[in-house]
Amino acid sequence: MSLIKKGDPEKVDKITLGIDTYIDTLYGCFRFDNPKIERFSTRKNVEMIFKSGKKIEVIVPENMKISLNDKLKVAHSPNFVLEQITGYEDTMKLLTMRAGWNQNDRDIERLVSYDPEGAFVGKIKTKDYDIPVSSCAVLPVGLHHTWIGMILVHPELRRQGIANMMMQYCIEYALKKNKVINGLDATPLGNTVYRAVGYVDSYRIWRSYYELEEFSDKTYDGNHVQKVTEKDLLDIIRYDAECFLPREQILRALYKDSEGMAYVYRDDNGVIKGYLLGRPGRIRPFVGPFTADDDNIAMDLLTAISYEYYKKGEKTAFIDTPEDKFNDPGIYVNNVFDQERKPSGHRLIRSIKPVRDFTRMYQVVNEKYAKELLEKFIKHENLPKNSPLLVRFEEMVYKAVENYIQSCSFMEFEKEVLKKKFYGTTGPEKG
């Protein structure tokens, strides 16, 4: 059964609130009158799936309107709560569709399964209503590290401090679990949110797609490239840990969901020199993680999986590729969602088309930076000095200082050394 049980935006043309409690919950975001961005309307046409071109009529009775306080952000209100997402996976799925992301139902189920206690739904909750409006997740990378993702807010509730509050909550959760390296891949819209809690830029990754037909007449080294089997997994997990961070749980889950689209390269001595996992997506297949010792090995792996997808009738595939794999990085303008001069001249893929960028970021906070972050938080949020929110923020940033050396060292080592083997990256939340 689909995660979205009723009112799937891919299947309906109209959403009417006030008739069905399931619809009222899933689409409750349209009840709010947000003075900061989105005023209430009883009837509107909404492109529910980003860049789909399809408008859905949303009808909300006037008596269901909920007015937000124009002097108090939702995130600062006791009515905003974060709860474990179990039972609200449909909200996370809807949020990904509204953002134009590629996750399918299985992606959502998989990422929640990594640590169900670390996946959250944000709600506006009173005695009269209980409405999910956002999601976030702290995803374990091995025993000692995390990847934070799925920071999503319904557009109708933006500019209410929700993303910032969720991010702070996620970091608190990770630090309480004694996680050391806490990374993420940020969209341009999320970058400022993450910087406010101590994340710093490492390098850019480009979400791109390419024509699978490009590889339809290419050959690869079948003596060294083989489909992954269960007996390959432990060797792949060890190879991957040398190239990035230990993530056995993630790789086993991705292999399980690869539907056989998984390849490994072994040299004449049987030593792994690269691997590549693929999986289905809502929009198109996703290729990654994709790690190899050099371009020739990477090309063999890419040819194998691309040819196989092409034979299955797929036309295109997504890949998240580091910017340094392009010969021309283009011209990057900060704080712009859709760059005009995107990279070109990819080293392996002629037909590649960059769509949007991510910035790999890590929380790297020393004592001086913690003080600066606290001062900025006080100024930006305009909170009294005895505010519990301020106390929580201060505790969080100074706790992060304990991880400064390890986080800073890994970030630089990845950027200067490890990244050379990355041809297609993936965080555990990616679809």
Image: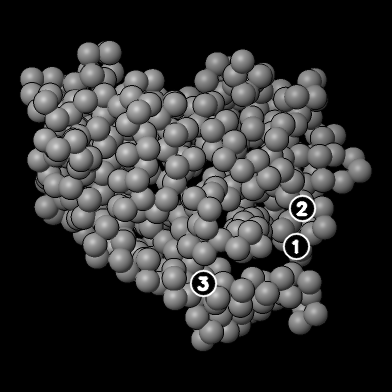
Give the Cα distance between marks 1 and 2.
7 Å
Three-letter code, disc 1? His
Three-letter code, disc 3? Asn
Q: Residues within 10 Å of mark 3 (few under 14, many from 20)?
A: many
Place of residue 399 in the rendered image (x, y in percent of width and height, measured from the top left): 61, 74
Q: Residues within 10 Å of mark 1 (few under 14, many from 20)?
A: some
**Do callouts 1 and 2 mark residues in contact (Cβ within 8 Å)?**
yes
On the image, numbered disc 3 is attached to which residue? 403
Q: Could you tell me if residue 377 is visible in this image?
A: no
Give the Cα distance between marks 3 and 1.
28 Å
Give the Cα distance between marks 2 and 3.
30 Å
Q: Which mark is residue 80?
A: 2
Q: In the displayed structure, does residue 308 sit left or right of residue 79?
A: left
Q: In the displayed structure, does residue 348 sit left or right of residue 45?
A: left
> Which residue is situated farthest in the right direction here?
127
Q: In the displayed structure, does residue 106 sit left or right of residue 267?
A: right
Place of residue 199 in the rendered image (x, y in percent of width and height, measured from the top left): 48, 67
Q: Nearer the viewer, residue 108 or 44?
A: 108
Can you say whether 359 is above or below 217 in the image? below
Disc 1 secondary structure class:
helix
Three-letter code, disc 2? Phe
Q: Which quadrant of the rendered structure holds the N terminus?
A: top right
Q: Which mark is residue 76?
A: 1
